[in-house]
Image (cartoon, rainbow, N blue to C red):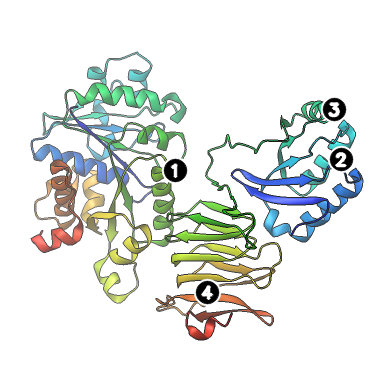
Amino acid sequence: MGGRVVTVTSGKGGVGKTTTTANLGLALARLDKRVVVIDADIGLRNLDIVMGLENRIVYDLVDVVEGRAKVKQAMIKHKQFPDLYLIPAAQTRDKSAVSPADMVQLCNDLRKEFDFILIDSPAGIERGFRNAMAPADDILIVTNPEVSAVRDADRVIGLIEAENKGPARLILNRVKMDLVRKGDMLSADDVTDILAVKLIGIVPDDEAVVSASNSGTPVTLQDNSRSGQAFRNIARGCAARTYLSCSLMRKAGC
Amino acid sequence: MTDAKIDIKGVRDGLLILIDENSEWMSAVGELVEKLDKQAAFFAGAKLTINLGSRPVTRHGLSSLKAALDNRKLALSKIMSDSPTTTDAAESLDLRTGPASVAPESDDMGATQRYRTQPFDPNEDTVVGLLVPRTLRSGRSVRSDGHVVVLGDVNAGAEIIAAGDIVIWGVLRGTVHAGAIGDVTARVCALEMAPTQLRIADRYSIAPQDKGRWRRTRPEMARIEGDFIVVEPWQRTARKD
Protein backbone atom coordinates (compact mmCIF):
# COMPACT_ATOMS: atom_id res chain seq x y z
CA MET A 1 0.00 0.00 0.00
CA GLY A 2 3.02 2.27 0.01
CA GLY A 3 3.56 5.26 2.25
CA ARG A 4 2.01 6.02 5.58
CA VAL A 5 0.02 9.16 6.29
CA VAL A 6 0.80 10.63 9.71
CA THR A 7 -1.33 13.55 10.90
CA VAL A 8 -0.11 15.84 13.65
CA THR A 9 -2.94 17.58 15.51
CA SER A 10 -3.81 19.01 18.93
CA GLY A 11 -7.10 20.87 19.20
CA LYS A 12 -5.54 23.82 20.97
CA GLY A 13 -3.35 26.23 19.05
CA GLY A 14 0.22 27.13 19.89
CA VAL A 15 1.20 23.84 21.48
CA GLY A 16 3.81 23.00 18.85
CA LYS A 17 2.11 21.13 16.00
CA THR A 18 4.05 22.87 13.27
CA THR A 19 7.36 22.61 15.11
CA THR A 20 6.71 18.92 15.71
CA THR A 21 5.77 18.27 12.09
CA ALA A 22 8.86 20.06 10.77
CA ASN A 23 11.18 18.27 13.18
CA LEU A 24 9.67 14.85 12.53
CA GLY A 25 9.89 15.45 8.80
CA LEU A 26 13.58 16.32 9.02
CA ALA A 27 14.35 13.52 11.48
CA LEU A 28 12.65 10.97 9.19
CA ALA A 29 14.59 12.35 6.21
CA ARG A 30 17.81 11.89 8.20
CA LEU A 31 16.81 8.25 8.60
CA ASP A 32 16.85 8.06 4.77
CA LYS A 33 13.09 7.97 4.45
CA ARG A 34 11.30 9.61 1.54
CA VAL A 35 9.10 12.21 3.19
CA VAL A 36 6.59 14.85 2.12
CA VAL A 37 5.12 17.25 4.67
CA ILE A 38 1.81 18.96 3.92
CA ASP A 39 0.72 22.18 5.58
CA ALA A 40 -3.06 21.83 5.99
CA ASP A 41 -3.40 25.15 7.81
CA ILE A 42 -4.77 27.02 4.82
CA GLY A 43 -4.88 30.75 5.40
CA LEU A 44 -2.39 30.64 8.28
CA ARG A 45 0.57 28.89 6.76
CA ASN A 46 3.66 28.47 8.92
CA LEU A 47 5.33 25.21 8.10
CA ASP A 48 7.25 26.73 5.18
CA ILE A 49 8.78 29.33 7.49
CA VAL A 50 9.80 26.80 10.14
CA MET A 51 11.42 24.65 7.44
CA GLY A 52 13.14 27.62 5.87
CA LEU A 53 11.41 27.22 2.49
CA GLU A 54 9.15 30.26 2.46
CA ASN A 55 10.89 32.05 -0.42
CA ARG A 56 10.61 29.05 -2.75
CA ILE A 57 6.83 28.77 -2.85
CA VAL A 58 5.32 29.01 -6.32
CA TYR A 59 2.29 26.73 -6.13
CA ASP A 60 0.44 25.55 -3.05
CA LEU A 61 -2.02 22.92 -1.82
CA VAL A 62 -5.07 24.78 -3.13
CA ASP A 63 -3.49 25.16 -6.58
CA VAL A 64 -3.07 21.38 -6.67
CA VAL A 65 -6.59 20.65 -5.47
CA GLU A 66 -8.11 23.11 -7.93
CA GLY A 67 -6.05 21.77 -10.80
CA ARG A 68 -3.87 24.82 -11.50
CA ALA A 69 -0.71 22.89 -10.71
CA LYS A 70 0.46 19.30 -10.70
CA VAL A 71 1.46 17.81 -7.35
CA LYS A 72 5.07 17.70 -8.51
CA GLN A 73 5.04 21.44 -9.20
CA ALA A 74 3.82 22.32 -5.72
CA MET A 75 6.33 20.10 -3.93
CA ILE A 76 9.30 22.11 -2.67
CA LYS A 77 12.51 20.15 -2.26
CA HIS A 78 14.35 20.74 1.01
CA LYS A 79 17.71 22.50 0.81
CA GLN A 80 19.62 19.78 2.64
CA PHE A 81 17.65 16.59 2.13
CA PRO A 82 16.78 15.72 -1.46
CA ASP A 83 14.16 13.20 -0.36
CA LEU A 84 12.23 15.68 1.77
CA TYR A 85 9.48 17.81 0.21
CA LEU A 86 6.99 20.38 1.43
CA ILE A 87 3.54 21.08 0.01
CA PRO A 88 2.72 24.53 1.39
CA ALA A 89 -0.71 25.84 2.34
CA ALA A 90 -2.33 28.71 0.47
CA GLN A 91 -2.18 31.94 2.39
CA THR A 92 -4.90 33.84 0.56
CA ARG A 93 -7.67 31.25 0.91
CA ASP A 94 -9.40 29.47 3.79
CA LYS A 95 -10.07 25.90 4.95
CA SER A 96 -13.16 25.51 2.78
CA ALA A 97 -10.96 25.58 -0.35
CA VAL A 98 -10.08 21.93 0.34
CA SER A 99 -12.36 19.00 1.21
CA PRO A 100 -11.55 15.83 3.15
CA ALA A 101 -12.01 13.86 -0.11
CA ASP A 102 -9.41 16.08 -1.82
CA MET A 103 -6.91 15.27 0.92
CA VAL A 104 -7.57 11.53 0.66
CA GLN A 105 -7.06 11.71 -3.10
CA LEU A 106 -3.85 13.72 -2.81
CA CYS A 107 -2.39 11.42 -0.17
CA ASN A 108 -3.25 8.31 -2.16
CA ASP A 109 -1.24 9.76 -5.05
CA LEU A 110 1.69 10.58 -2.78
CA ARG A 111 1.73 7.18 -1.08
CA LYS A 112 3.15 5.63 -4.23
CA GLU A 113 6.33 7.67 -4.09
CA PHE A 114 6.91 8.41 -0.42
CA ASP A 115 7.46 6.45 2.77
CA PHE A 116 5.84 9.10 4.95
CA ILE A 117 3.31 11.82 4.33
CA LEU A 118 3.17 14.12 7.35
CA ILE A 119 0.18 16.45 7.66
CA ASP A 120 0.34 19.53 9.86
CA SER A 121 -3.24 20.03 11.05
CA PRO A 122 -4.62 23.44 11.93
CA ALA A 123 -5.88 24.10 15.45
CA GLY A 124 -9.56 23.59 16.15
CA ILE A 125 -12.02 20.80 15.41
CA GLU A 126 -13.68 22.18 12.30
CA ARG A 127 -13.17 21.77 8.55
CA GLY A 128 -9.38 22.12 8.61
CA PHE A 129 -9.10 19.46 11.28
CA ARG A 130 -11.37 17.12 9.33
CA ASN A 131 -9.30 17.71 6.18
CA ALA A 132 -6.13 16.74 8.02
CA MET A 133 -7.76 13.74 9.67
CA ALA A 134 -9.45 12.20 6.62
CA PRO A 135 -6.39 10.50 5.04
CA ALA A 136 -4.56 9.68 8.30
CA ASP A 137 -3.16 6.24 9.07
CA ASP A 138 -1.41 7.35 12.25
CA ILE A 139 -2.46 10.26 14.42
CA LEU A 140 -0.08 12.09 16.71
CA ILE A 141 -1.62 14.41 19.28
CA VAL A 142 0.65 17.20 20.50
CA THR A 143 -0.13 18.70 23.88
CA ASN A 144 1.54 20.76 26.58
CA PRO A 145 1.48 19.93 30.28
CA GLU A 146 -1.25 22.52 30.82
CA VAL A 147 -4.82 21.84 31.84
CA SER A 148 -6.35 23.71 28.89
CA ALA A 149 -4.15 21.95 26.31
CA VAL A 150 -4.90 18.56 27.87
CA ARG A 151 -8.63 19.33 27.84
CA ASP A 152 -8.53 20.10 24.12
CA ALA A 153 -6.45 17.02 23.42
CA ASP A 154 -9.10 14.96 25.23
CA ARG A 155 -11.82 16.43 23.02
CA VAL A 156 -9.83 15.71 19.87
CA ILE A 157 -9.09 12.13 20.94
CA GLY A 158 -12.83 11.67 21.52
CA LEU A 159 -13.57 12.87 17.98
CA ILE A 160 -10.92 10.57 16.56
CA GLU A 161 -12.35 7.59 18.43
CA ALA A 162 -15.85 8.48 17.28
CA GLU A 163 -14.63 8.23 13.67
CA ASN A 164 -12.90 4.92 14.34
CA LYS A 165 -9.56 6.45 13.44
CA GLY A 166 -6.46 6.05 15.51
CA PRO A 167 -5.33 4.89 17.97
CA ALA A 168 -4.20 8.41 18.78
CA ARG A 169 -0.68 8.67 20.14
CA LEU A 170 0.55 11.43 22.37
CA ILE A 171 3.54 13.77 22.25
CA LEU A 172 4.01 15.89 25.36
CA ASN A 173 5.74 19.07 24.29
CA ARG A 174 7.39 21.87 26.23
CA VAL A 175 7.87 20.04 29.53
CA LYS A 176 9.83 21.94 32.17
CA MET A 177 11.44 19.21 34.21
CA ASP A 178 12.33 21.47 37.15
CA LEU A 179 8.71 22.64 37.47
CA VAL A 180 7.44 19.07 37.27
CA ARG A 181 9.83 18.05 40.05
CA LYS A 182 8.53 20.89 42.23
CA GLY A 183 4.97 19.74 41.54
CA ASP A 184 4.09 23.00 39.76
CA MET A 185 3.54 21.43 36.35
CA LEU A 186 1.50 18.43 35.24
CA SER A 187 3.75 15.39 34.93
CA ALA A 188 3.67 12.91 32.08
CA ASP A 189 1.84 10.52 34.40
CA ASP A 190 -0.81 13.12 35.24
CA VAL A 191 -1.43 13.69 31.54
CA THR A 192 -1.59 10.02 30.56
CA ASP A 193 -3.87 9.37 33.55
CA ILE A 194 -6.42 11.69 32.01
CA LEU A 195 -5.97 10.99 28.32
CA ALA A 196 -5.34 7.23 28.52
CA VAL A 197 -3.43 7.04 25.24
CA LYS A 198 0.11 5.90 24.48
CA LEU A 199 2.74 8.54 25.16
CA ILE A 200 5.39 8.26 22.46
CA GLY A 201 7.52 11.30 23.20
CA ILE A 202 8.35 13.87 25.85
CA VAL A 203 9.95 17.01 24.45
CA PRO A 204 11.65 19.24 27.02
CA ASP A 205 11.06 22.98 26.93
CA ASP A 206 14.03 24.44 25.08
CA GLU A 207 14.75 27.99 23.96
CA ALA A 208 16.76 26.60 21.07
CA VAL A 209 13.47 25.40 19.51
CA VAL A 210 12.27 28.97 19.07
CA SER A 211 15.44 30.34 17.56
CA ALA A 212 15.82 27.27 15.36
CA SER A 213 12.27 27.64 14.07
CA ASN A 214 12.76 31.33 13.40
CA SER A 215 15.88 30.65 11.36
CA GLY A 216 14.23 27.85 9.40
CA THR A 217 16.59 25.14 10.61
CA PRO A 218 14.57 22.94 12.99
CA VAL A 219 16.21 21.94 16.24
CA THR A 220 16.41 18.26 15.36
CA LEU A 221 19.38 19.11 13.13
CA GLN A 222 21.39 20.11 16.20
CA ASP A 223 22.98 16.92 17.48
CA ASN A 224 23.61 18.18 20.99
CA SER A 225 20.07 19.46 21.62
CA ARG A 226 17.88 17.50 24.06
CA SER A 227 14.66 18.56 22.40
CA GLY A 228 16.19 17.65 19.04
CA GLN A 229 17.03 14.24 20.47
CA ALA A 230 13.44 13.84 21.65
CA PHE A 231 12.16 14.48 18.12
CA ARG A 232 14.71 12.04 16.68
CA ASN A 233 13.47 9.36 19.11
CA ILE A 234 9.87 9.92 18.07
CA ALA A 235 10.91 9.74 14.40
CA ARG A 236 12.65 6.43 15.01
CA GLY A 237 9.44 4.99 16.50
CA CYS A 238 7.52 6.41 13.56
CA ALA A 239 9.95 4.96 11.00
CA ALA A 240 9.78 1.54 12.60
CA ARG A 241 5.99 1.95 12.87
CA THR A 242 6.22 0.66 16.42
CA TYR A 243 5.86 3.96 18.27
CA LEU A 244 7.65 2.85 21.41
CA SER A 245 6.15 4.26 24.56
CA CYS A 246 8.21 6.68 26.60
CA SER A 247 8.61 4.32 29.51
CA LEU A 248 10.14 1.74 27.17
CA MET A 249 12.46 4.34 25.65
CA ARG A 250 13.63 5.32 29.09
CA LYS A 251 14.46 1.69 29.83
CA ALA A 252 16.35 1.48 26.56
CA GLY A 253 18.38 4.48 27.65
CA CYS A 254 17.28 6.94 24.98
CA MET B 1 -42.43 10.55 37.18
CA THR B 2 -45.41 9.12 35.32
CA ASP B 3 -48.38 11.43 35.02
CA ALA B 4 -51.89 11.06 33.73
CA LYS B 5 -51.40 13.30 30.70
CA ILE B 6 -47.67 13.61 30.11
CA ASP B 7 -44.97 10.99 29.90
CA ILE B 8 -41.31 11.78 29.28
CA LYS B 9 -38.74 9.31 28.01
CA GLY B 10 -35.08 9.53 27.08
CA VAL B 11 -34.42 8.49 23.47
CA ARG B 12 -31.29 8.36 21.38
CA ASP B 13 -31.44 11.91 20.08
CA GLY B 14 -33.09 13.70 22.99
CA LEU B 15 -36.28 13.44 24.93
CA LEU B 16 -39.58 12.00 23.81
CA ILE B 17 -42.69 13.56 25.29
CA LEU B 18 -45.92 11.63 25.06
CA ILE B 19 -49.08 13.65 25.47
CA ASP B 20 -52.08 11.49 26.23
CA GLU B 21 -54.42 11.78 23.26
CA ASN B 22 -57.57 11.73 25.36
CA SER B 23 -56.69 14.63 27.64
CA GLU B 24 -57.90 18.20 27.15
CA TRP B 25 -55.36 19.97 24.90
CA MET B 26 -54.85 23.25 26.74
CA SER B 27 -54.60 21.63 30.16
CA ALA B 28 -52.12 19.06 28.78
CA VAL B 29 -49.97 21.86 27.37
CA GLY B 30 -50.25 23.68 30.70
CA GLU B 31 -49.10 20.60 32.54
CA LEU B 32 -46.19 20.08 30.18
CA VAL B 33 -45.06 23.68 30.59
CA GLU B 34 -45.30 23.35 34.36
CA LYS B 35 -43.13 20.24 34.17
CA LEU B 36 -40.58 21.95 31.98
CA ASP B 37 -40.32 24.89 34.37
CA LYS B 38 -40.10 22.75 37.49
CA GLN B 39 -37.22 20.69 36.10
CA ALA B 40 -35.57 23.30 33.95
CA ALA B 41 -32.06 21.92 34.57
CA PHE B 42 -32.97 18.50 33.24
CA PHE B 43 -34.56 19.82 30.08
CA ALA B 44 -32.03 22.58 29.35
CA GLY B 45 -30.69 22.23 25.83
CA ALA B 46 -32.55 19.00 25.11
CA LYS B 47 -34.02 18.22 21.72
CA LEU B 48 -37.67 17.36 22.12
CA THR B 49 -39.78 15.00 20.09
CA ILE B 50 -43.47 15.15 20.90
CA ASN B 51 -45.80 12.23 20.31
CA LEU B 52 -49.41 13.31 20.05
CA GLY B 53 -50.90 9.93 19.21
CA SER B 54 -53.92 10.24 16.94
CA ARG B 55 -55.17 13.50 18.45
CA PRO B 56 -56.04 16.12 15.84
CA VAL B 57 -54.32 19.39 16.71
CA THR B 58 -54.83 22.59 14.75
CA ARG B 59 -52.04 24.82 13.49
CA HIS B 60 -53.05 27.33 16.16
CA GLY B 61 -52.86 24.76 18.96
CA LEU B 62 -49.48 23.52 17.79
CA SER B 63 -47.98 26.96 17.35
CA SER B 64 -48.93 27.92 20.92
CA LEU B 65 -47.11 24.80 22.12
CA LYS B 66 -44.10 25.63 19.97
CA ALA B 67 -44.08 29.22 21.29
CA ALA B 68 -44.09 27.95 24.86
CA LEU B 69 -41.05 25.76 24.06
CA ASP B 70 -39.28 28.54 22.14
CA ASN B 71 -39.69 30.83 25.14
CA ARG B 72 -37.83 28.26 27.21
CA LYS B 73 -35.11 27.86 24.57
CA LEU B 74 -36.09 24.25 23.92
CA ALA B 75 -35.78 22.85 20.44
CA LEU B 76 -38.84 21.03 19.14
CA SER B 77 -37.27 18.68 16.65
CA LYS B 78 -40.16 16.49 15.59
CA ILE B 79 -43.88 15.91 15.93
CA MET B 80 -45.11 12.33 15.85
CA SER B 81 -48.75 11.94 15.01
CA ASP B 82 -51.18 9.61 13.26
CA SER B 83 -53.64 12.41 12.59
CA PRO B 84 -53.44 14.09 9.14
CA THR B 85 -54.72 17.36 10.69
CA THR B 86 -51.83 17.43 13.14
CA THR B 87 -49.28 16.38 10.53
CA ASP B 88 -50.40 19.13 8.16
CA ALA B 89 -50.31 21.68 10.99
CA ALA B 90 -46.79 20.61 11.97
CA GLU B 91 -45.56 20.74 8.39
CA SER B 92 -46.96 24.24 7.95
CA LEU B 93 -44.85 25.22 10.97
CA ASP B 94 -41.73 23.70 9.34
CA LEU B 95 -41.54 20.90 11.87
CA ARG B 96 -40.38 17.41 11.03
CA THR B 97 -43.14 14.84 11.30
CA GLY B 98 -43.49 11.10 11.57
CA PRO B 99 -46.01 8.43 12.49
CA ALA B 100 -46.84 8.14 16.19
CA SER B 101 -46.43 4.41 16.34
CA VAL B 102 -42.65 4.09 15.77
CA ALA B 103 -39.74 5.28 17.85
CA PRO B 104 -37.88 8.33 16.52
CA GLU B 105 -34.59 7.66 14.77
CA SER B 106 -31.54 9.82 15.11
CA ASP B 107 -30.27 11.51 11.98
CA ASP B 108 -27.85 13.71 13.84
CA MET B 109 -24.37 12.46 14.63
CA GLY B 110 -23.34 15.55 16.58
CA ALA B 111 -21.09 15.70 19.60
CA THR B 112 -24.02 15.09 21.88
CA GLN B 113 -24.57 11.40 21.96
CA ARG B 114 -27.62 10.03 23.61
CA TYR B 115 -28.36 6.44 24.12
CA ARG B 116 -31.59 4.60 23.71
CA THR B 117 -32.95 3.27 26.96
CA GLN B 118 -34.90 0.08 26.98
CA PRO B 119 -36.31 -1.94 29.83
CA PHE B 120 -34.85 -5.42 30.06
CA ASP B 121 -37.97 -6.69 31.83
CA PRO B 122 -41.03 -4.48 31.91
CA ASN B 123 -42.58 -6.53 34.71
CA GLU B 124 -39.75 -5.95 37.12
CA ASP B 125 -40.19 -3.00 39.44
CA THR B 126 -36.93 -1.19 38.72
CA VAL B 127 -35.78 2.00 37.07
CA VAL B 128 -34.20 1.52 33.69
CA GLY B 129 -30.43 1.96 33.52
CA LEU B 130 -28.12 3.00 30.76
CA LEU B 131 -24.68 1.44 30.40
CA VAL B 132 -22.01 3.50 28.69
CA PRO B 133 -19.18 1.03 28.08
CA ARG B 134 -16.41 3.55 27.44
CA THR B 135 -14.68 6.65 28.74
CA LEU B 136 -16.62 9.87 28.16
CA ARG B 137 -14.17 12.46 26.91
CA SER B 138 -14.55 16.22 26.88
CA GLY B 139 -17.53 17.38 24.81
CA ARG B 140 -19.64 14.25 25.29
CA SER B 141 -23.04 14.49 26.87
CA VAL B 142 -25.24 11.66 28.12
CA ARG B 143 -28.82 12.13 29.24
CA SER B 144 -31.15 9.51 30.64
CA ASP B 145 -34.47 9.36 32.36
CA GLY B 146 -33.13 6.42 34.38
CA HIS B 147 -29.80 5.53 35.94
CA VAL B 148 -26.46 5.84 34.17
CA VAL B 149 -23.50 3.51 34.57
CA VAL B 150 -20.18 4.33 32.92
CA LEU B 151 -17.45 1.74 32.47
CA GLY B 152 -14.52 4.15 32.17
CA ASP B 153 -13.70 7.70 33.19
CA VAL B 154 -15.85 10.78 32.84
CA ASN B 155 -13.35 13.44 31.84
CA ALA B 156 -13.57 17.15 32.50
CA GLY B 157 -15.75 18.76 29.86
CA ALA B 158 -18.09 15.75 29.65
CA GLU B 159 -21.50 15.73 31.31
CA ILE B 160 -24.08 13.24 32.47
CA ILE B 161 -27.62 14.23 33.36
CA ALA B 162 -29.78 11.48 34.78
CA ALA B 163 -33.12 11.33 36.51
CA GLY B 164 -31.78 8.50 38.66
CA ASP B 165 -28.39 7.49 40.07
CA ILE B 166 -25.02 7.78 38.37
CA VAL B 167 -22.34 5.14 38.86
CA ILE B 168 -18.89 5.58 37.39
CA TRP B 169 -16.50 2.67 37.28
CA GLY B 170 -13.54 4.97 36.80
CA VAL B 171 -12.50 8.52 37.61
CA LEU B 172 -15.15 11.25 37.70
CA ARG B 173 -13.63 14.53 36.51
CA GLY B 174 -16.54 16.06 34.60
CA THR B 175 -19.95 17.39 35.57
CA VAL B 176 -22.75 15.06 36.65
CA HIS B 177 -26.32 15.71 37.68
CA ALA B 178 -28.14 12.86 39.42
CA GLY B 179 -31.80 13.10 40.34
CA ALA B 180 -32.16 15.78 37.72
CA ILE B 181 -35.97 15.68 37.84
CA GLY B 182 -35.90 16.32 41.55
CA ASP B 183 -35.12 12.98 43.21
CA VAL B 184 -33.25 13.97 46.40
CA THR B 185 -32.44 10.34 47.17
CA ALA B 186 -30.34 10.01 44.01
CA ARG B 187 -26.67 9.11 44.45
CA VAL B 188 -23.43 9.45 42.57
CA CYS B 189 -20.74 6.80 42.97
CA ALA B 190 -17.25 6.78 41.46
CA LEU B 191 -14.04 4.87 41.98
CA GLU B 192 -12.35 8.24 42.22
CA MET B 193 -14.16 11.53 42.83
CA ALA B 194 -12.68 14.67 41.29
CA PRO B 195 -15.73 16.24 39.64
CA THR B 196 -15.77 19.68 38.09
CA GLN B 197 -19.23 19.99 39.57
CA LEU B 198 -21.53 17.48 41.19
CA ARG B 199 -25.27 18.06 41.30
CA ILE B 200 -28.00 16.08 42.98
CA ALA B 201 -31.60 17.24 42.53
CA ASP B 202 -31.44 21.02 43.13
CA ARG B 203 -28.17 21.02 45.14
CA TYR B 204 -24.74 21.32 43.72
CA SER B 205 -21.22 21.11 45.05
CA ILE B 206 -17.70 21.46 43.78
CA ALA B 207 -14.72 19.39 44.82
CA PRO B 208 -12.71 20.87 47.68
CA GLN B 209 -9.81 22.83 46.23
CA ASP B 210 -6.99 22.16 48.65
CA LYS B 211 -4.14 22.85 46.33
CA GLY B 212 -1.98 19.77 46.75
CA ARG B 213 -3.59 16.40 46.27
CA TRP B 214 -7.27 17.11 46.05
CA ARG B 215 -7.67 13.77 44.40
CA ARG B 216 -8.62 10.93 46.64
CA THR B 217 -8.01 7.53 45.19
CA ARG B 218 -10.77 5.57 46.84
CA PRO B 219 -14.32 4.75 45.83
CA GLU B 220 -16.78 7.28 47.16
CA MET B 221 -20.48 7.96 47.12
CA ALA B 222 -22.20 11.34 47.09
CA ARG B 223 -25.76 11.87 48.32
CA ILE B 224 -27.89 14.53 49.92
CA GLU B 225 -27.93 14.64 53.70
CA GLY B 226 -29.98 17.45 55.19
CA ASP B 227 -29.29 20.50 53.07
CA PHE B 228 -25.92 19.43 51.74
CA ILE B 229 -24.30 17.00 49.41
CA VAL B 230 -22.01 14.76 51.40
CA VAL B 231 -19.31 12.57 49.91
CA GLU B 232 -18.30 9.50 51.86
CA PRO B 233 -15.92 6.64 51.25
CA TRP B 234 -17.65 3.58 49.87
CA GLN B 235 -17.61 1.37 52.92
CA ARG B 236 -19.99 -0.87 54.72
CA THR B 237 -21.31 2.11 56.72
CA ALA B 238 -22.24 3.97 53.58
CA ARG B 239 -24.34 1.07 52.38
CA LYS B 240 -27.12 1.38 54.91
CA ASP B 241 -29.80 0.48 52.47
Q: Please determine whether, in this image, residue A67 is positioned above or below residue A88.
A: above
Of A200 and A41, nearer the camera is A200
Q: Please determine whether, in this image, residue A128 is positioned above or below residue B198.
A: above
Which labelled disc corresponds to residue A236? none
Depth check, mark 2 against mark 1: the one in front is: 2
Report the side of A219 relative to B122 (left or right).
left
Residue B178 in the image: state x and y as whole percent.
61, 65
Give the residue pinned by disc 2. B64
Are both tags, 2 and 1, on one chain?
no
Q: Residues within 10 Å of mark 4 (few under 14, many from 20)?
A: some
Give the residue pinned by disc 3. B85
Q: CA distance from mark 2 to mark 1?
A: 40 Å
Image quadrant assignment for residue A230? bottom left
Q: Residues within 10 Å of mark 2 (few under 14, many from 20)?
A: few
* Residue type, numbered disc 3: Thr
> Of helix, strand and loop, which one carries label 4?
loop
Q: CA distance from mark 4 to mark 3?
A: 53 Å
Residue A97 in the image: state x and y as whole percent.
44, 24
Residue B163 in the image: state x and y as whole percent.
65, 61
Report the side of A136 relative to B43 (left or right).
left
